[in-house]
Amino acid sequence: MRIAALRLRQRDGRTCGPSVAVLAGALLDSGYRAGLSGADAGRAWFADEQLRVHALLNRAWPRALGTTPMGMARALNMRSRGRGVRYRWRLWRGRRDALADVLETAGADWPVPMLIGRYIPRHWVLIVDTPGDALHCYEPSSGEVRTVDVSAVRLGRLSGLGYPKPFAFVVPRIETRTAAG
């Protein structure tokens, strides 16, 4: 799916999380992705779906405060269940964060939501690819896919996404198996 060509934008200043959840769900579930077919109809479906998902994810949490990492993981799990994958969230570990799980899963075509901000978490973006030492990130307020250096994520010096610092990632669980299993 060519995300940039779809020009999918969040509908207001509080729906970056639902926008990321809907797009990630479309990447995970081909049946759900069918809602995006047709340029105008797809954008209308996307706008309506943001509201539905926002209400679903924020039942106990005020919508004005955005989508929590737990809510984002729950949204992705609704779409990844059929593929036998469970998402979880984790904090950014600062400069010592190797991002191995983020790079591995995004490089294997699994979408990875990233919560960013300046002093507090404020905005969701979606990592959709890892070409070389970079990340392709869907930025919902513009509807664009922007390139960010992996080193900028590690150092908390993001540019082009609206805020400089990662706070959390939502990644598929990496399950380890024993030699007997």
Image (tube, helix red, strand yellow):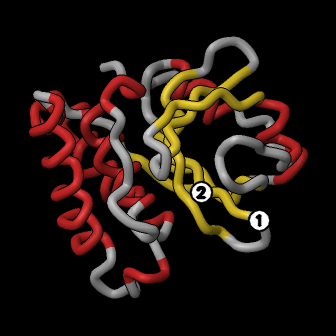
* Circle 2 crowding by C-alpha within 10 Å: few under 14, some 14–19, many from 20: many
Q: What type is the residue that disc 1 sits on?
A: Arg
132 sits to left or right of 4: right
143 sits to left or right of 147: left
Q: Which residue is mark 2?
A: 115
Mark 2 vs mark 1: in front: 1
Cα–Cα gap, marks 2 and 1: 11 Å
31 sits to left or right of 149: left
- For the point 61% across and 35% down, the residue is 102
Instruction: Identify the mark at residue 142; answer none if there is no mark.
Output: none
In the rendered image, residue 172, in percent from the top left (x then y), is placed at 46, 40
- For the point 10% across and 39% down, the residue is 41
* Circle 1 crowding by C-alpha within 10 Å: few under 14, some 14–19, many from 20: some
Can residue 173 be seen in this snapshot?
no
In the rendered image, residue 104, in percent from the top left (x then y), is placed at 59, 24
Out of 89 and 164, give the one closest to the viewer. 164
Quadrant where the C terminus sits is top left
Can residue 158 be seen in this snapshot?
yes
Q: Which residue is mark 1?
A: 118
- For the point 65% across and 68% down, the residue is 121
Q: What type is the residue that disc 2 sits on?
A: Leu
Quadrant where the N terminus sits is top left
